[in-house]
Image (tube, rainbow, N blue to C red):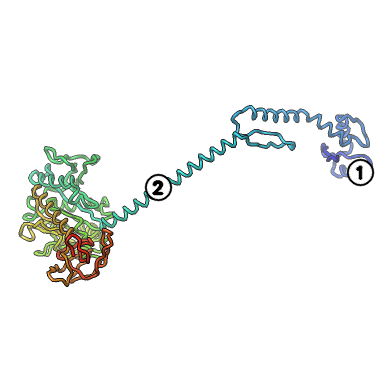
Amino acid sequence: LKLPRLHRTWGCSAWPSGRRAMLAQSSQAARGVEPARCEYARAREGSELGAPGAPDSWAPAGQRLLGRVRRHARGVAALLLAAAALCALAAARPGTSRRGVISAFGHVEFVESKQARDELRRERAKLKAKLAALRDEEANIDLRLSTIKKKLEKGRHEHFPSFFCFLVMQTVQDSPEMGWAEEALVRDSFVKQAGIFACEGSAVFTIRRVVIGPALGKHGFRAVDDDYVPKDNETTSWGVGGHTAQKGSQSNPLNSQMFINSWKAIEKHSMLDGHHWVAKVDPDAVFFPHRIRWHLGVLFPQDLRGEGKYFLLNCQRFYSMQGPVELLSKAAAATFMQSMKQVCPVGQAVAEDQYMQKCLQSLGVKGVFNDHILQDQYCEQTLPDCDSGAIVAFHPFKDPKLYEKCRNASVTRELNDQKVALQAGHCTDAGTHCKFPFHYNGGQFTACTQVDSDRDDRNGNGNHNDGKPWCGTQTWVSNDPQSYGSRTPRGGLG
């Protein structure tokens, strides 16, 4: 067994005698190490190894190895004892997953026991079960998200374009003569979520902030501070200050400043964000906001988002925009709010609707006429006929009972119009009474049409419309596929 030279002391190498020793001595001398010093070191080490002297071949390799083993015996013994203790500790723990064994090369190998393998299998099974549950939950989440997205898309379609509607209300505390009637009308609309509360966004403006809820106290709606938090069945108005309006919406000039304050609050709080059109409504107007979409689809089929600057004229007699319903596109409202201070100062004897129309016209906003927006006693000089399912608003109805009677009559007519929009037969059949122009699906028709004439029956019973021209027998036609001619009679329809 050839062992390497293990001795290095003070720069001296352990070398044998003879010529190699002389060469080594000369090498040591070349490095500046005293040969006598190295001789002394070798002699001392030879003495420790049990071979004192040995001038020529001192401390053979085997002898030096035994000496080192004797010097390091304690360390080796400690290492063996530590290994034995580690093995004993691993064997003494009954639940241990691994035990250590000292190999012939001094390494520690880990060998799994049967119990450890069983535990590992059980852990893997649990993790697989958890992973499967997480995947199922992820699939359910994806399904719910898909359902929510479909509902949102449907909601966007049903509520597009979006409307922001507001009204200015006189309260009992500020105007006892007018306040009781207006508070009662607003309360009924709020409870039924009708009128402006059926819009996608709404607000009520008052001189002082009040709580709007299902009950009226001895003094009407209760005034509250700005930090009041409404309950689930309540809402609050926006207190904007101003002065009480005089009795009579048209016979006497209204105070325009309160309406200006309302528009300022709308601009300050960004109430129009997310909406496309704005409707200002009087509290005593029976208002159906969903019908506005029908008319906008005819008037502005390419601009339902209100990106153009328009306002609707609703009184043919005066060719004006009457105050019960003031309908503006979002772009027109933004132009008005930005310029009303500089371009449109408030006059002292100008009614609010007149002020609004003059200001919009001076700002270059285009007025578009539609006679289905409003039936107004002050415009037509006759009481409004609520037996219509297409008019957006009827005005005035200051008595809550008459207000509700008008609402019910108009809703009933709208439902009947949706059930039967066309008579049996086609445009070429005898006895067919066509109504021109008629409106259908956002379009206006002045003659018979084949639009959707080949549409499938919504009941999915295999019936198909025959593709022949058809017409409407009423001004407004629903999207019901059963409402126009087909080869198969259904419910009296041809």
Q: Quadrant of residue 359?
A: bottom left
Instruction: In the rendered view, tell whether residue 178 sits above or below residue 487.
Output: above
Seen from the viewer's position, the closer of residues 233 and 8 is 233
C-beta proximity under 8 Å, tags 1 and 2? no
| Residue topped by disc 2 | 140
In what quadrant of the picture does the N terminus appear?
top right
What's the residue type where badge 2 is placed?
A: Asn
> Which numbered dot is residue 257?
none
Residue 281 drawn at (x, y percent):
16, 54
Seen from the viewer's position, the closer of residues 319 and 56 is 319
How many marks overall? 2
Q: What element carries label 1?
A: helix
Residue 212 drawn at (x, y percent):
18, 43
Q: Quadrant of residue 289?
A: bottom left
In what quadrant of the picture does the C terminus appear?
bottom left
Answer yes or no: is residue 352 visible: no
Residue 163 is left or right of residue 323, and the answer is right
Mark 1 or 2 closer to N-term?
A: 1
The residue sitting at 20% across, 53% down in the picture is 165
What's the residue type where badge 1 is placed?
A: Arg
Residue 232 drawn at (x, y percent):
24, 41
Seen from the viewer's position, the closer of residues 220 and 260 is 220
Mark 1 is surrounded, within 10 Å at the Cα level, by few (under 14), some (14 to 19) or many (20 or more) other residues, namely few
> Which numbered dot is residue 20?
1
The residue sitting at 37% across, 49% down in the picture is 144
Mark 2 is surrounded, within 10 Å at the Cα level, by few (under 14), some (14 to 19) or many (20 or more) other residues, namely few
Q: Is mark 2 on a helix, strand or loop?
A: helix
Answer yes or no: is residue 274 visible: yes
Q: In which quarter of the image is residue 420?
A: bottom left
